Image (cartoon, helix red, strand yellow):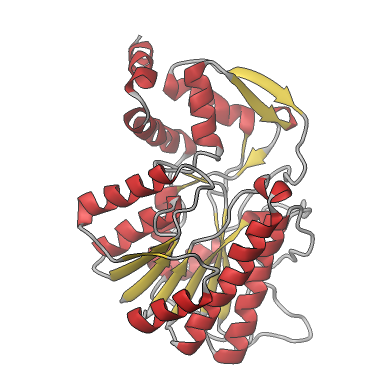
């Protein structure tokens, strides 16, 4: 297939591009290389992919640039779109709300318009477990309502699901939304807990643990995310023939539209997650316990039985093994003076 991957220099995007190219697809990437975090990490991810599978077309375009997005679709004529680009981060949305409107709403509209005017066989787009918001019924099911987001970021992700549904209904665009649950692994974002925690432990600086470490998160290793996407890309949804307007199911539709959770199904308290990180780094953290932050949810846990039913795959990398792989990458990527002493301590 000819596949357009947006956010191709991002954490999930780079891993996804690598897998799709290895599977024999032709991939065109899109990324704006913004400075939400150090763009050098994004360039390094692209170089990492190219070192393994060779070069691939990568357009530096902002999602909000409607003419540029239209021109890209007209030129590439993709069979499928995997839309992973977005303004990420719950806490950043408290101070920079407009960035989320430009990227997550206007930008997503431009992708939908591209799929409308240059029909694709399948649009897969990233949603988030944050859409469950104030819902405390776990495990989170795609059949549950998601009407109480706790951050603007979460609200934009729910809006994406609704926008995709309307375009699926009106224009027959087969679309699949993926609610990711706390993705981690090599080449992750520096604003997420694995790199923040590892750097604090290495440096001996205070490590802020909000809600006194009692949050629970359903961690999902990056390879499990990518495997799920690879299996879904050539399985576009169809209309649900038994969908009932009187009792509408939130996970499917009379339109060719579906929602899946992708998570590990094994929530872990952050203090236990930190203990595993300490084990693999061979050092103890200097922990600063703090109260709950605005916008944070207390716990997440994914119900993924429908993903397994439709793809035959269930996320399988345990947190201990995933963090071992992450720490190996962290030591390799970040400065040698930070990880050389760690190796000695670990051996001891």
Q: Is residue 149 left or right of residue 83?
A: right
Q: Is residue 103 left or right of residue 76?
A: right
Residue situated furthest top in the rendering: 348
Which quadrant of the figure contains the C terminus? top left
Quadrant of the image occupied by residue 147: bottom right
Residue 131 visible (yes or no):
no
| Residue at left offset 43%, top offset 73% | 81
Q: Looking at the image, how many numbered discs can be counted on the residues?
A: 0
Tell me residue 181's x, y (percent): 57, 51
| Residue at left offset 50%, top offset 61% | 85
| Residue at left offset 68%, top offset 51% | 96
Q: Is residue 217 left or right of residue 6?
A: right
Q: Is residue 280 left or right of residue 107?
A: left
In the depicted view, which residue is nearer to us: 288 or 97? 97
Residue 124 visible (yes or no):
yes
Which quadrant of the figure contains the N terminus? bottom left
| Residue at left offset 66%, top offset 39% | 216
Tell me residue 233's x, y (percent): 40, 71
In the depicted view, which residue is nearer to us: 200 or 273? 200
Tell me residue 44's x, y (percent): 33, 45
In the depicted view, which residue is nearer to us: 176 or 269? 176
């Amino acid at each position: 297939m000819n596949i357009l991957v947006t956010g191709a220099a991002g954490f999930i995007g780079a891993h996804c591009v690598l897998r799709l190219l290895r599977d024999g697809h032709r991939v065109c990437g899109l990324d704006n290389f913004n400075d939400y975090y150090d763009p050098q990490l994004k360039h390094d991810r692209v170089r990492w992919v190219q070192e393994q599978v060779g070069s691939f077309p990568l357009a530096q375009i902002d999602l909000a640039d409607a003419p540029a997005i239209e021109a890209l679709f007209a030129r590439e004529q993709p069979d499928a779109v995997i839309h992973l680009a977005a303004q990420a981060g719950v806490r950043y949305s408290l101070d920079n709300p407009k960035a989320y409107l430009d990227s997550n709403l206007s930008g997503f509209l431009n992708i939908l318009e591209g799929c409308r005017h240059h029909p694709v066989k399948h649009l897969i787009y990233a949603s988030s477990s944050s859409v469950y918001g104030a819902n405390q019924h776990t495990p989170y099911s795609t059949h549950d309502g998601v009407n109480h987001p706790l951050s603007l970021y979460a609200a934009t992700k729910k809006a994406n699901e609704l926008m995709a549904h309307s375009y699926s209904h009106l224009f027959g665009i087969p679309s699949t939304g993926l609610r990711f649950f706390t993705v981690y692994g090599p080449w992750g974002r520096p604003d997420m807990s694995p790199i923040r925690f590892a750097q604090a432990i290495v440096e001996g600086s205070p490590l802020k643990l909000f809600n006194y470490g009692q949050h629970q998160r359903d961690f999902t290793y990056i390879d499990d995310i990518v495997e799920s996407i690879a299996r879904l890309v050539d399985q576009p949804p169809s209309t649900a023939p038994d969908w009932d307007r009187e009792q509408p199911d939130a996970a499917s539709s009379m339109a060719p539209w579906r929602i899946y959770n992708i998570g590990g199904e094994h929530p872990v308290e952050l203090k236990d997650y930190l203990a595993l990180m300490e084990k693999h780094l061979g050092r103890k953290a200097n922990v600063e316990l703090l109260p709950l932050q605005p916008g944070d949810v207390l716990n997440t846990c994914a119900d993924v039985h429908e993903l397994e039913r439709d793809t035959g795959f269930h996320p399988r990398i345990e947190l201990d093994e995933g963090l071992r792989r992450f720490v190996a990458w962290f030591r390799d990527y970040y400065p040698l003076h930070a990880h050389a002493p760690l190796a000695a301590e670990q051996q001891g």
